Image: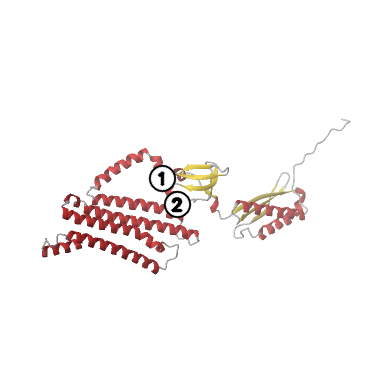
Amino acid sequence: MCLRWIMEEVSSAWDLDVLTGVWIIEIVVGILVLVLANFGLKKVMRYLRRRSLATPYDWKERLEQICYLPIHFLLWILGITYVIDVLGHHFGFSAALDYLDSFRNAAVISCLSWLLLRWKTEVQNSIIVKNQIGKKSIDPGTAHILGKLLTILISVITLMIILQILGLDVMPLIAFGGIGAAAIGFAGKDVIANFFGGLMLYISRPFTAGDLILLPERDIEGHVEEIGWYTTSIRDKEKRPVYLPNAMFSTMLVINSSRMSHRRLLEVISIRQEDFAQVVAIVEGIRQVILSDPLIDKNLPVHVFFSEFGDYALRIHLDAYSLATRHDEFLQFKQEILIKIQKVLSAHGAVMPYPTSVTIYPSESS
């Protein structure tokens, strides 16, 4: 250390009897430097915060909270190790000094890793806040999974570096870990399959929490409550929680009703065969009703045609697409359309057929 070297040079130039307390001076000076460094750190953090033009939902606004605690802790570690180094050289604790440099280097790496993890958390939180206020940058689900993967990556790399600093050969550990991972993977293949299934759900995002999905193969329909690492929770129409392993979604058909752009209005309207003379006018009246509704998408085909002579009725085919995608909104829209169609039929004197039966009684003479 620089301070240590200066003191040794002064000690060699002066009489050692005069400087018998030089080690005390080194400790005092080291503590003063530590205090001044902490004071300067606080000033720098406050200055950066005042100079920042970031908005409250930006991670730069919390730069002081991200950096201060890891750097503050690192300064204290360096100060304590310096004091131990001075005491060790003065009292001859050479055994303790052999591991001091390794401990100091490991502390530096740990504090740097800690700072990266705190920064990662603040960036993830700022992304979520931006989505909540409408400033979308990255989907919160993607930010969540990327945050978890980054945490694992930083932790593993930090552990490997610290083991290398402490003098341990990590290559046999990696080789042994690979063999152990293969054995664990074979034994827990279902768990691993569900883990990677959850990872693919986060990456591909066929649905997110809150979406209404339909699983035809399992006859399950409900809202997604949570996408976990192992299972996905769905609340079905009976308000029962359904827990499905994530691996199932890689081979199962999933219909996401929350992402539909339109709902199809498909109806068959029947009138009596006696009303055939009015069928053209009725068809045109129904077409005008459909085209005049603001919830009908006119950019998509609108089909209203007389389509079939039935056994007891004439059938009119209606096919159009509604912009009302919510189920309750679509039902309200459909109700209004059907009421308007009934008014068109009544205006032209047409009546919907209904089953009738005629009973013929034999005459009394027979």
Spatial separation of the CA atoms under disc 1 and disc 2:
14 Å
Residue that label 2 marks: 204
Please name whichever residue, 264 or 273, is drawn nearer the observer in this view of the structure.
264
Residue 181, above or below 364: below
**Mark 1 or 2: the one toward you:** 1
Left-right relation of 295 to 199: right
Expressed as whole percent of the image width and height from the top left, the position of residue 334 reads 66, 52
Q: Secondary structure at mark 1?
A: helix
Residue 175, above or below 340: above
- The mark that comes first in sequence, 1 or 2, is 1
- The answer to whether residue 160 is visible is yes
Res. 251 mark: none
Q: Are marks 1 and 2 in contact (CB under 8 Å)?
A: no
Residue 202, above or below 34: above
Residue positioned 29% across, 43% down in the render: 177
Residue positioned 38% across, 39% down in the render: 188
Left-right relation of 32 to 355: left
Expressed as whole percent of the image width and height from the top left, the position of residue 260 reads 55, 53
Q: Residues within 10 Å of mark 2 (few under 14, many from 20)?
A: few
Residue ranking furthest to the right:
365
Residue that label 1 marks: 195
Q: Where, quadrant-wise, is the N terminus in this rendering?
A: bottom left
- The answer to whether residue 1 is visible is no
Expressed as whole percent of the image width and height from the top left, the position of residue 166 reads 23, 50
Q: Secondary structure at mark 2?
A: helix
Looking at the picture, which amino acid does disc 2 mark?
Answer: Ser
Please name whichever residue, 233 or 22, is drawn nearer the observer in this view of the structure.
22
Q: Residue 61, located in which quarter of the rendered image?
A: bottom left
Residue positioned 36% across, 52% down in the render: 151
Looking at the picture, which amino acid does disc 1 mark?
Answer: Phe
Please name whichever residue, 24 or 123, is drawn nearer the observer in this view of the structure.
24
